[in-house]
Image: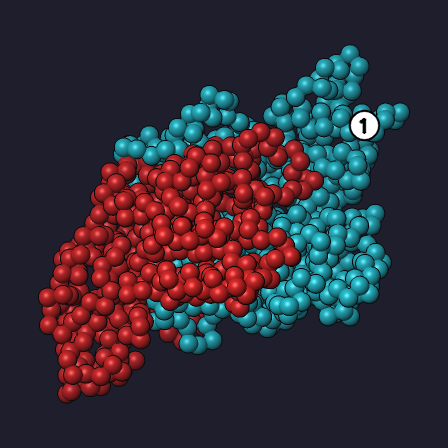
Chain colours: A red, B cyan
Amino acid sequence: MASDLNKHTYSSLLTRINTAASETTLIRRPDPGEFIDLLKLAVPGASRPIEEVIKDAHEIFSFRIAVSHPRFFSCIPSPASPLSKLGDCLTTAHNPFGGSWEASAGVCTIETGLIKWIAQIFGLPSSAGGQFVSGASMANLTAMVVARDQTLRVEERSNGVAYISEQTHFCVRKALRIIGIPDHQIREIKTDSKFRMNLSLLEKTIDEDLQNHRKPFLLVASCGTTNTGSIDALEDLARIAQGRRMWLHIDAAYGGSVAFSETHRSKVKDICFADSVAWDAHKWLFQTHGCGAVFFRDQSQSLESFSSTGDYVRDVECQEELPDPWNYGVELTRPARHMRLWFTLQVLGLQKFDQMICHGFELSRHLECMISTLDDWEIISPSSLAILNFRYAPQGVDLATLNQLNEAISKEIASRDVAVIFTSHLDNLVCLRMCTINPETSKDDIEHVVKSLDNIAREVHSPSRKEVLWRE
Amino acid sequence: MASDLNKHTYSSLLTRINTAASETTLIRRPDPGEFIDLLKLAVPGASRPIEEVIKDAHEIFSFRIAVSHPRFFSCIPSPASPLSKLGDCLTTAHNPFGGSWEASAGVCTIETGLIKWIAQIFGLPSSAGGQFVSGASMANLTAMVVARDQTLRVEERSNGVAYISEQTHFCVRKALRIIGIPDHQIREIKTDSKFRMNLSLLEKTIDEDLQNHRKPFLLVASCGTTNTGSIDALEDLARIAQGRRMWLHIDAAYGGSVAFSETHRSKVKDICFADSVAWDAHKWLFQTHGCGAVFFRDQSQSLESFSSTGDYVRDVECQEELPDPWNYGVELTRPARHMRLWFTLQVLGLQKFDQMICHGFELSRHLECMISTLDDWEIISPSSLAILNFRYAPQGVDLATLNQLNEAISKEIASRDVAVIFTSHLDNLVCLRMCTINPETSKDDIEHVVKSLDNIAREVHSPSRKEVLWRE
């Protein structure tokens, strides 16, 4: 077994870690026959040679959208550093039990120290703490449980009201539903022209709820919305929340990473006003999937929601001030998700992170500059945290046709294997949305993509080529 | 970078994957100085040589209890197969986005097929489905959200009652609190002499609640309790739940793996009665931490609780019958947790899994047999699913002293680096609890451990050596 593992791991695993994503095609989908084959392959049976299984594994993984490709610009790209992969492989090799300090004193101490340090660059006080979770869905959920428990008595829960904006990530509403706050207790506040929560509408809505004897308890702000990279007016929202004794949760899943860049940190400095923060290292901090974190201004508040125990762990429970992670979050058994980030930060150093984050901002400004100067194109939402929304909009074409045109451009540039640029909806306009945070993306890539977009736009818009517009 | 990664990964990562856990000490804790050093090491700064960081990483990981060691018998041991580690490293190298079918068609199809196959060996119908999650805490939580949503109208929630047993894992009560079912809506039913939920007490409690116009909605059964490996009377519980239109959730986090053994599958055949099931592959199926799953008798029910969407993913949403995992569970971004299990199953084959699971049963029976024939020792809970509780109990010694004696034995055998055997509480008795599922544990290990236990017991109980009993 051991020699098998050595031989094949070396040839296969490491080659893969070091393979540049740019060497692959952008999208591979299984055809119906391949789909059936995959379903069959899922089922175990007799033992099979490891070489064969490794080959199958690579084939399975190959059916995907290459979200780490330098010309994948959709959703939030996942440009994971090879160092994050290596750090996570090292962690897997040791397989620590991340739920208990006693069971994994080393990794738990690193987690405590790293969380404290990140809380500090977010501007949170020394009372702050938190833990790593699988991502923002879990971070938001964990924070909302504590928000609920700190602000509402059990008998008040069905009367509590939470406030989000129409640009709040959909996992926030989902988390609220999960913890027992149904839709009729959630207010979705409209956004202003910069896609930030409209403050006067928010105050008006809260006041109405108070007049109706409801109990406003939670205000969810965004630091880096997924659609447009917008940052809500965090300081103003903090003032509104404090004045009404509401909990301020900041979803900084995307934007929080900017705090790791000394150059750009000031853009997100108002995270410091949060009672709780959700953040993803697997977005703009170049980590593999499953690396997010939740922070609390006062760590002890999460203990009140999550502390619990069992007979069979009585000998490993910490008697001291060292926190057992299982008492501060949802999970008992959990992997040590932070070690990959620790590893990447140590090897690359903070200056390199600053450069990598700066690069994303620069690409986005370069893109914005190019689009602005092109005929028949318009910016819908300016570059914010390296996200730009724009569209092809020649004069004299009606909205429905423009929307179809931009959808066709999005499909065509992917089918030509040039770039993945999904559309988004902003105020009923179908936009092309590009998030340019991949450090492997070059200015040449951006220029090539813009040129291709423009060529494709003129092709699909040409009356003689109408069929292109409508093809799937 | 690439060559650095190759060189150091080869020498360090693979050596570690192949290092037998038995070669290490059982417990290493940081002393106060080392603890301070670890906290300092957590904080990033300037770039550091990769060799140095890898060395530090191994040092960090070394402060732990060796939960995969063949003589670690506490909690549920984590005897992860090297193949699980390799499978997970391959997954990390590809870093698929496991939340969306379109983004990762290959791994999502394997997940669908594998979940369907496991549901089948659990005896669930073809309508069943589910998904991989980080572990039983999340699996139980996910199931309970669906149970709540399928059985209670929103306005009934504060009146709903959930039934667990006093041996139910503590993460179940915690999950209920998280989703908004507070303690006063949870009934903890006493267990019978075999630590199974007492059926007549359960029925009596439900009837009382009904008379008080409460709404019983959820019955949580255990298939393999953590303390004693007990299996509740699942078929009887199913009858009780069905008769009262309650949801039957089975926490098979530990016991579910027995369904992978053709030899022992019949022991857990009544999982088939569940509306939902929680199961951990990182317990008795030899996977690395963070590999659990949740199952639903009717997969579509989870869609009703978790379906949600956002503007920026409109182009990747599945139009067909292919399920996007994010709509069937809590998380959006999620790693492909199942690929390590798929990999291990394919390489080892089902027959090997049967043998590995059988080995655990055999070790436990061997241990039980040895303890039964030793003077002054008694079995407190017989071998069930490879878990045995027993204690040193010489005649004429009062209960308090016996409890202290057994605690001292547990501490002493660990401090001698022979074995980790934590104590558990069963009916006020402090027991030594051994879970013998590690395939690397030999009968010789068991015999050595029993001999050591007996020697230590007689030493700590000797009046002339009284100080040993009381030392920390």
Q: Is residue B393 above or below residue A378?
A: above
Does residue A170 appear to the left or right of B410 in the view shown? left
Does residue B386 appear to the left or right of B99 in the view shown? right
Q: Residue furthest right?
A: B396
Q: Which of the pair A140/A108 is nearer the observer?
A: A140
**Residue A386 in view, yes or no:** yes
Q: Which of the pair B157/B245 is nearer the observer?
A: B157
Where's residue A12, x and y in %? 35, 50
Identified at 39% across, 28% down, the residue is B40
Q: Residues within 10 Å of mark 1 (few under 14, many from 20)?
A: few
**Residue B6 in view, yes or no:** no
Q: Which of the pair B148/B221 is nearer the observer?
A: B148
Disc 1 marks which residue? B400
Q: Is residue A273 above or below residue A365?
A: above
Q: Which quadrant is home to the C terminus of chain A?
A: bottom left
Q: Chain of mark 1?
A: B
Q: Which image quadrant for residue A200?
A: bottom left
Where's residue A56, x and y in %? 41, 60
Identified at 55% across, 53% down, the residue is A148
Number of marks present in the image shown: 1
Identified at 42% across, 42% down, the residue is A338
Where's residue A243, x and y in %? 45, 51
Q: Which of the pair A173/B443 is nearer the observer?
A: A173
Kindly state the secondary structure of the residue where label 1 is placed. helix
Where's residue B306, x and y in %? 52, 66
Q: Is residue A189 above or below residue B66?
A: below
Does residue A465 appear to the left or right of B357 in the view shown? left
Identified at 27% across, 32% down, the residue is B46
Q: Amino acid at mark 1?
A: Ala
Q: Residue furthest bottom?
A: A464
Q: Residue furthest front?
A: A211
